[in-house]
């Protein structure tokens, strides 16, 4: 066994040691150097920073990667500006600056972050292109970068879902999960499983989705409480669609309990919304409407206009179920005004307007309210998707 | 991508991990020349560039995956 080490070109070992020493220095200096550059330069001028040698280091790129993660969910446009800078710096870096494998990783993760930012901004085709470029950066190392590649491809699978490439997305998720398992990375493997469940729900394959979630709970006794709460939430919504109302109630109750313990009131409200839907679908529309009115008020008091609007659409569905079309019409028109005042996506407002008109013309069934609600939810990740009326779809 | 290793510890860690992975490569009957390069590449991709929580499992997985990849490619 010892002879393996002796067979290695000793220049490669020296290169490893030298790179290690450089990385320690770069990591120590990056917060001061890169932090100051970002702070003292207007965001519009950031692209020019990529020419600076101080930014073309592994330490600087790691710093930008961490900075990117801080902003991704708070301000995706800012996160994209960081990722654009990281990609430009990584691509400008000489190929010989680090061992080829490290260069490949640095470039791949910069492109991967850019893809994530694009996905958050709803630019899914561009995101797919970024992830594909990231994957190409990892085509070195004879399979040693399989874990990096799986991380990139997991993200690719998310964007494939948004472009309706469901079968491809599912295949990529399964492959990535296998790689994560082989590398002893249960956290990412679990994310793949959960994402597979979400994908099946989007495909309206609720029974299979529920199976996936149930297996996840059974196979992951150490699952974090937030993930456990989200999984019970998802099972609850699948069970409603399957008409298994007792199971839905049990799982939504678990979800609410766990989210309450975590101090996440908005998530508790979303689980309560599941119970409202359950009541409407299980033959208790009046009670469901009453519950949704309470939840809607809570969302409005928190300034969550879109969530409140989605609850409003659940109420419209309930009112149409019990034949109260005029109340449904009044509420639908109120939702149009609320969405307009809140400056929400104009496509959502158009879809709500269509619903109002259909109710006025006595052409609206409860399923149209469901269709409009699902459309508005889809705009969160696909903001330029067109609304298709029942005649078009 | 982050690591907090001190400069001197990189090479010590490299040597220790190299020995452990050599055992695995030998058990998997990888030709010695291939094994040396693969182990070096796996260690480079992990010890220099990545923060990995369970590194023992990760390294074994990475090496096994690379061996499988190389065998299927040849």
Image (tube, rainbow, N blue to C red):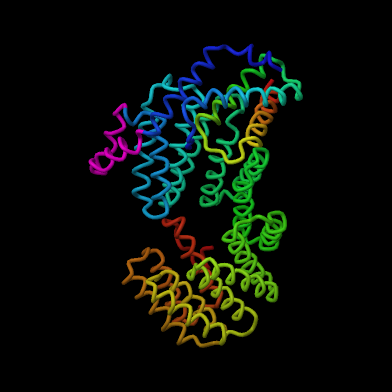
- Quarter occupied by residue A209: bottom right
Q: Which residue is drawn at 51% across and 48% down?
A: A159
Count of numbered labels shown in the rendering: 0
How would you classify the magenta stretch by its main secondary structure? helix
Q: In this view, does A227 lie above or below B68?
A: below
Q: What stretch is highlighted in magenta?
A: A29-53
The x, y position of residue B17, in whole percent, is 62, 26
Q: Residue at x 51, y 50 (%)?
A: A163
Q: Is residue A338 above or below residue A169?
A: below
Q: Which residue is drawn at 35% across and 33% down?
A: A29
The question of residue A33 being in magenta is answered with yes
The x, y position of residue A99, in whole percent, is 48, 21
Q: In this view, does A16 lie above or below A342?
A: above
The x, y position of residue B65, in whole percent, is 67, 31
- Quarter occupied by residue A171: top right
The x, y position of residue A226, in whole percent, is 56, 61
Q: In this view, does A45 lie above or below A236?
A: above
Camera-side residue: B61 or A18? A18
Camera-side residue: B60 or A299? B60
Camera-side residue: A50 or A259? A259
State the quadrant of the C terminus of chain B: top right
The question of residue A387 being in magenta is answered with no
Residue A79 placement, left or right of A108 = left
């Amino acid at each position: 066994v010892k002879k393996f080490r002796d067979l290695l070109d000793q220049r490669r070992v020296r290169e490893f040691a030298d790179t290690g020493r450089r990385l320690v220095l770069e990591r120590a200096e990056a917060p001061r150097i890169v932090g100051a550059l970002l702070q003292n330069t207007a965001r519009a001028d950031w692209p020019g920073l990529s020419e600076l040698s101080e930014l073309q280091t592994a330490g600087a790129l790691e710093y930008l990667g961490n900075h990117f993660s801080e902003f991704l969910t708070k301000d995706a446009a800012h996160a994209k500006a960081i990722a654009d800078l990281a990609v430009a710096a990584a691509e400008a870096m000489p190929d010989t600056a680090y061992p080829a494998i490290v260069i490949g990783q640095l470039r791949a993760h910069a492109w991967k972050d850019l893809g994530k930012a694009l996905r958050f901004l709803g630019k899914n085709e561009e995101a797919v292109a970024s992830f594909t470029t990231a994957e190409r950066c990892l085509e070195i190392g004879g399979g040693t970068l399989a874990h990096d590649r799986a991380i990139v491809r997991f993200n690719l699978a998310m964007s494939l879902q948004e472009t309706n490439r469901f079968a491809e997305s599912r295949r990529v998720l399964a492959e990535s999960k296998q790689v994560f398992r082989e590398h002893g990375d249960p956290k990412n493997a679990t994310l793949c499983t959960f994402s597979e469940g979400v994908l099946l729900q989007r495909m309206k394959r609720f029974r299979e989705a529920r199976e996936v979630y149930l297996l996840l709970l059974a196979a992951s006794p150490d699952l974090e409480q937030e993930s456990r709460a989200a999984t019970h939430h998802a099972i609850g919504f699948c069970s409603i669609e399957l008409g298994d109302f007792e199971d839905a109630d049990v799982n939504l109750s678990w979800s609410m309990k766990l989210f309450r313990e975590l101090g996440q009131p908005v998530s508790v409200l979303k689980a309560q919304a599941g119970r409202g839907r359950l009541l409407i679908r299980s033959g208790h529309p009046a009670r469901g409407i009453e519950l949704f009115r309470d939840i809607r008020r809570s969302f409005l008091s928190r300034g969550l206009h879109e969530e409140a609007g989605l609850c409003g659409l659940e109420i419209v569905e309930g009112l149409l179920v019990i034949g109260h079309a005029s109340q449904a019409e009044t509420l639908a028109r109120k939702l149009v005004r609320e969405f307009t005042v809140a400056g929400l996506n104009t496509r959502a407002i158009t879809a709500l307007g269509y619903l109002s008109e259909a109710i006025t013309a006595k052409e609206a069934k409860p399923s149209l309210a469901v269709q409009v609600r699902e459309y508005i939810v889809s705009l969160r990740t696909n903001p330029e998707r067109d609304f298709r009326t029942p005649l078009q779809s | 991508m982050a690591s907090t290793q001190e400069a001197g510890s990189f090479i010590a860690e490299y040597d220790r991990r190299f020995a452990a992975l050599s055992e695995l490569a030998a058990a998997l009957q990888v030709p010695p020349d291939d094994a040396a390069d693969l182990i070096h590449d796996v260690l480079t991709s992990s010890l220099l560039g990545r923060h990995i929580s369970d590194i023992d499992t990760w390294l074994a997985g990475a090496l096994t995956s690379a061996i499988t990849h190389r065998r299927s490619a040849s």
